[in-house]
Image (spheres, rainbow, N blue to C red):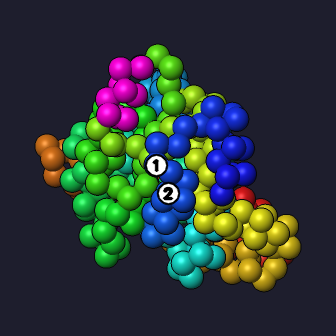
Amino acid sequence: MPELQNLFEKMGGRFVTLPDVLAEKAARIRAVVFDWDGVFNDGVKDESGSSTFSEVDSMGTNLLRFGLWLHQGRMPASAIITGVHNERALELVGREHFHAGYVQAKHKVAVLEHFLNQHGLQPHEVAFFFDDALDLSVAAVAGVRILVKRAANPLFTNYVLANDLADYVTGHESGRFAVREGCELLLGLLGRYDEVMAERLRYFPVYDDYYAARQAIVPQLWRIENQVINPYLAEAAVEKATAHADTNPPSNLRNPQ
């Protein structure tokens, strides 16, 4: 554990919770939930009002889910919860077969409760990646809290730390692969990183089994209006999001992450 701590602190990461304690919390993770803007990107919008993501971070989410699948013997529940409408977020949910995507979530802890009820889970079983004020209600209850660093908001960071709302602050800033950093940290804390890499390299049969199970997930998309959580064009949106890939190709022809 000291070697892992040194490695992440050298690149600027900050352990708010001691690594040994954080490893115990990570071992209880059954779900991974991500904010979108400021986490997968720097929050800057394009002309359509959307914001994008990096394949480096996407790969990180997949490797973490694979590691948790190995560790727990079951697929971890996964979701993106964003405070605004963002088509690219829903596209990632569909392409990567997350269990759920929520848009226009202004009171996120209520949305988290909805998600956890769908999967029979408790807040302490959630790892949460976040960056801003809208996320604090979830950070207050989640089991593992990864705060994405942003130098421009020192008072916010101080508030989070003073109120015990984060376990780790990334060394990388928003839009600079902080999701990948957090995912690798959790895999390291679980002691699964080398196994994940070896099985991904080998591919058959272990990773192939995981990938088939992941691809069988049908993402559920939700939109919050007046604090009511409603299905959001689930069929059409998921079909669009998964249109670029055959979800069940022959195993030797798959092109997964």
Question: How many residues crowd mark 1 within 10 Å: few (<14), some (14–19), many (20+)?
Answer: some
Quadrant of image for the C terminus: bottom right
Quadrant in the rendering for residue 194: bottom right
Q: Residue at x 53, y 43 (%)?
A: 15
Where is residue 248? Give x, y as percent: 66, 74
Q: Which residue is mark 1?
A: 17
Q: Is residue 162 left or right of residue 73?
A: left
Q: Is residue 211 left or right of residue 41?
A: right
Tally the marks. Answer: 2
Q: Secondary structure at mark 2?
A: helix
Q: Which residue is mark 2?
A: 22
Q: Secondary structure at mark 1?
A: loop
Identify which amino acid the numbered label 1 is placed on: Thr
For marks 2 and 1, the one nearer the N-term is: 1
Question: How many residues crowd mark 2 within 10 Å: few (<14), some (14–19), many (20+)?
Answer: many
Q: Is residue 158 magenta?
A: yes
Identify which amino acid the numbered label 2 is placed on: Leu
